[in-house]
Image: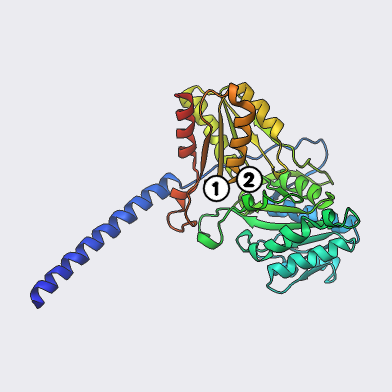
């Protein structure tokens, strides 16, 4: 019996090693295929004025620096922001403006947002940082039932429109289930809030300044993989970019592609692949603001192309792509040449080593283009 058990044990070990080696080989091949999930293409600033080379987190720092300099009521607070934050977005601001205007808080997301609501209601400009978007949910009640409803429930006598909540979001290559999530869809269901996601440094600075100065509470999600990877010549002056206005990045005639944040850079590469390999002309649109979103720009594009693909990192079920698909189907039904496609994260927790299989990469998006054009 001992000999039989030993033999079975050795067979079990051998099979386990074969499975382990096969899994490692598949993951390695897929990681090699996805070695560069996207290539960042720097944009050219639309200005004749002075510009400075900045990555995305430096552009955000510059925006907050301008606000602190021009608005004496502005304060920045959150976990570790005093020394610059884990992503260095507030580096140097405490030294420049003092500990009363840039300061740390306890490790309590509910407390951070609740405090921010109070600061904004009292008339000051409140810029709160949640260290990771994955951990914003303890503050969900404050955002849903307080910040979003404050103006409405007081008959516009009071509001907390001077509140901006910043939070890093999205896949980063090694964040696993608690540091990779895209949570924008949860907040798109809350009237009274605005939700913004930039795609690069130029956009980040202009949208951040608009968000801080907007008379409504704004959640500003920052794709953390772009913090250092995205580098552009950013205008050094004070400028704003419009909220709730999508931007057409590439004009096309056959397929409309919609995304936001990091996904825009994947879709840009997909558009080039579709043109080179399929002869398909894609129109690429950056939504920029999730709530309230720019329906008209998407509708106009789909009426022209007859096809729509939406891509985002968040899970497919009840992701914001579903809202876009439903709205466009209602408005453009007679113009559609194929079913609307959604290319999204899977309906699972965000994985670690299997991240390359999870994200809506260029190959999955490219297959959706082929499916629509062959319909």
153 over 230 or under it: above or below: below
> Would residue 145 be visible to someone looking at this image?
yes
Image point 60% across, 36% down: which residue? 326
Q: Which mark is residue 313?
A: 1
C-alpha gap between disc 1 and disc 2:
10 Å
- Residue 355 percent across, percent down from the top left: 46, 53
Image point 67% across, 52% down: which residue? 187
262 over 272 or under it: above or below: below
Per the image, label 1 sits on a secondary structure element best described as strand
Depth check: give the residue in front, 339 or 47: 339
Q: Name the residue under label 2.
A: 261
Image point 77% across, 61% down: which residue? 146
Count residues near mark 1 (Cα–Cα under 10 Å), then give few for <14, some for 14-19, many for 20+: many
N-terminal label among 1 and 2: 2
Count residues near mark 2 (Cα–Cα under 10 Å), then give few for <14, some for 14-19, many for 20+: many
> Would residue 161 be visible to someone looking at this image?
no
Displayed quadrant of residue 240: top right
Image point 64% across, 47% down: which residue? 230
Badge 1 vs badge 2, beta-carbon distance below 8 Å: yes
């Amino acid at each position: 019996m001992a000999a039989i058990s030993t033999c079975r044990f050795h067979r079990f070990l051998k099979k386990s090693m074969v499975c382990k080696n096969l899994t490692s080989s598949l993951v390695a091949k897929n990681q090699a295929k996805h070695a560069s999930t996207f290539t960042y293409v720097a944009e050219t600033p639309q200005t004749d004025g002075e510009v400075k080379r900045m990555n995305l987190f430096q552009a955000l720092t510059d925006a907050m620096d301008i606000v602190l300099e021009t608005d004496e009521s502005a304060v920045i607070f959150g976990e570790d922001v005093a020394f610059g934050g884990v992503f260095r977005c507030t580096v140097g601001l405490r030294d420049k403006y003092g500990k009363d205007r840039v300061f740390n808080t306890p490790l309590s997301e509910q407390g951070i947002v609740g405090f921010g609501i109070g600061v904004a209601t009292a008339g000051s400009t409140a810029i709160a940082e949640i260290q990771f978007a994955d951990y914003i949910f303890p503050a969900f009640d404050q955002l849903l039932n307080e910040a979003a409803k404050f103006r409405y429930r007081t008959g516009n006598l009071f509001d907390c429109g001077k509140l901006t909540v910043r939070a890093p979001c999205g896949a980063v290559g090694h964040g696993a289930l608690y540091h990779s999530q895209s949570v924008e869809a949860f907040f798109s269901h809350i009237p009274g809030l605005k939700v913004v996601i930039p795609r690069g440094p130029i956009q980040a600075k202009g949208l951040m300044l608009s968000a801080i100065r907007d008379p409504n509470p704004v959640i500003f999600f920052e794709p953390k993989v772009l913090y250092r990877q995205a580098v552009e010549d950013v205008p050094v002056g004070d400028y704003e970019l419009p909220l709730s206005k999508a931007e057409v990045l590439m004009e096309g005639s056959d397929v409309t592609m919609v995304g936001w944040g990091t996904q825009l850079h994947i879709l840009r590469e997909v558009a080039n692949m579709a043109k080179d390999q399929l002869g398909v002309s894609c129109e690429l649109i950056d939504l920029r603001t999730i709530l309230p979103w720019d329906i008209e720009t998407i509708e106009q594009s789909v009426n022209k192309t007859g096809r729509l693909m939406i891509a985002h990192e968040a899970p497919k079920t009840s992701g914001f792509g579903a809202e876009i698909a439903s709205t466009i189907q209602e408005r453009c039904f007679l113009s559609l040449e194929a079913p609307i496609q959604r290319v999204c994260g899977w309906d699972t927790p965000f994985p670690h080593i299997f991240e390359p299989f999870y994200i809506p990469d260029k190959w999955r998006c490219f297959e959706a283009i082929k499916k629509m054009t062959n319909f």
